[in-house]
Image (cartoon, rainbow, N blue to C red):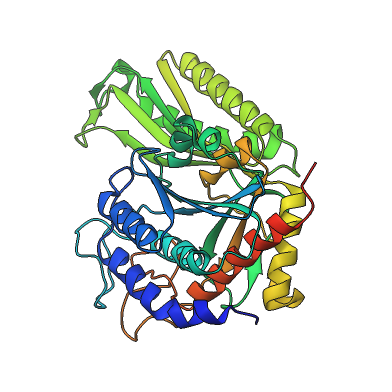
Amino acid sequence: MKLIDSIVAAAPAIARIRRDLHAHPELCFQEVRTADMVAAKLTEWGIEVHRGLGTTGVVGVVRAGTSQRAVALRADMDALPMQEFNTFSHASVHAGKMHACGHDGHTAMLLAAAQYFSTRRDFDGTVVLIFQPAEEGGGGAREMIKDGLFEKFPVEAVFGMHNWPGAAVGSFAVSGGPVMASSNEFKITLRGRGGHAALPHNALDPVPVACQLVQSFQTIISRNKKPVDAGVISVTMIHAGEATNVIPDSCELQGTVRTFTIELLDLIEQRMRDISQHTAAAFGMECTFEFDRNYPPTINSHPEAAFARGVMEGIVGQALVQVQEPTMGAEDFSYMLLAKPGCYCFIANGEGEHREMGHGGGPCMLHNPSYDFNDELIPLGATYWVRLAEAWLAAPQPQ
């Protein structure tokens, strides 16, 4: 493994920053302390700082030479609204808030790269360091773009990275094409007529209709879409009734839809709407159908993914750069990939053995209350960021 020596030497100090961030998690668009710390470190290292994009976003700009070329590297900063189970010294001090997805580590890896760039600018051009708020449902990438991110900081390409538990530290995964799904939410309200549970013939019971909808939606997956196209419909909430002997007036269903293409998403939304409305009508009920499209699919540009793979192989070797298996999870880096060519890769977070013995009641998986970012990744992730930016700006300009 070809790590940069000075980054390895500085990694313990960066790890202390990471643990401080972990102990003080902030939710989407509330990352004030986190943004202050990021901006303070960039300023301390002599890096040009811009603030306020996407509410709490921070952008660092590192220039060298005379070239007008530029490349962007992105890390997310926000935490999740969940209670941490860990009891180690850097566990969250804020009840109901936790860095359970490793954004503290993503921020740390990019800070480590920024520190290196502040002393060694072995490139000709500009590296734009994007510290983004509100990835966890807030669409911070979209908001930064709305605030003029790529107009103020024009770049040729943008790259992102996420830690991935379950694989050995020292490996990466990257591929061109779809790597994460779109994220969409629905809410369906069936309105019948309530009554006594002993006299169902006097009522219009929405509960069995809701049950029929849950089953019918799966026929969209099994019978309407192409078998080779990936799609998931999950009804995750059903709310109805307040007493065991009362048929409720209404029943509400909520859940999510995930796809890798907009075409399949269009099909699923339309079929769900049709099935909901017509099934309700068949039982003499009214139906309200709401469908919100949140994050689009994350689709890597093939040239940029191949370029990133080459950089990774130069650091860890070809055998440790895996094919990136697409996941039905979603990521708002997708908005940046709609605006610019680029690539979103995974860096392995290990199996959880980095956690102190006895801390946490479960596996070290993303969005798990026992999760913790593996600080061993800091020098590897930062080395990747540095070598990627240097190689990009040294390569022939993309046409």
Residue in the image at 41% along x and 18% along y: 288
Location of residue 169 (image quadrant): bottom right
Q: Is residue 27 left or right of residue 61?
A: left
Residue 188 drawn at (x, y percent): 42, 26
Residue in the image at 34% along x and 86% along y: 357
Location of residue 356 (image quadrant): bottom left
| Screen quadrant of the C terminus | top right
Residue in the image at 76% along x and 49% along y: 302
Measured along the vertical axis of the image, is residue 24 above or below residue 230?
A: below
Location of residue 197 (image quadrant): top left
Residue 201 drawn at (x, y percent): 33, 19
Residue 147 drawn at (x, y percent): 44, 31
Residue 160 drawn at (x, y percent): 56, 54
Q: Nearer the viewer, residue 38 or 336?
A: 38
| Screen quadrant of the N terminus | bottom right
Measured along the vertical axis of the image, is residue 92 above or below residue 180?
A: below
Residue 280 seen from this side: yes
Q: Is residue 164 left or right of residue 396?
A: left
Measured along the vertical axis of the image, is residue 27 above or below residue 348?
A: above
Residue 323 seen from this side: no
How many numbered discs, if any? 0
Residue in the image at 58% along x and 74% along y: 167
Q: Is residue 88 left or right of residue 323?
A: left
Measured along the vertical axis of the image, is residue 221 above or below residue 251?
A: below
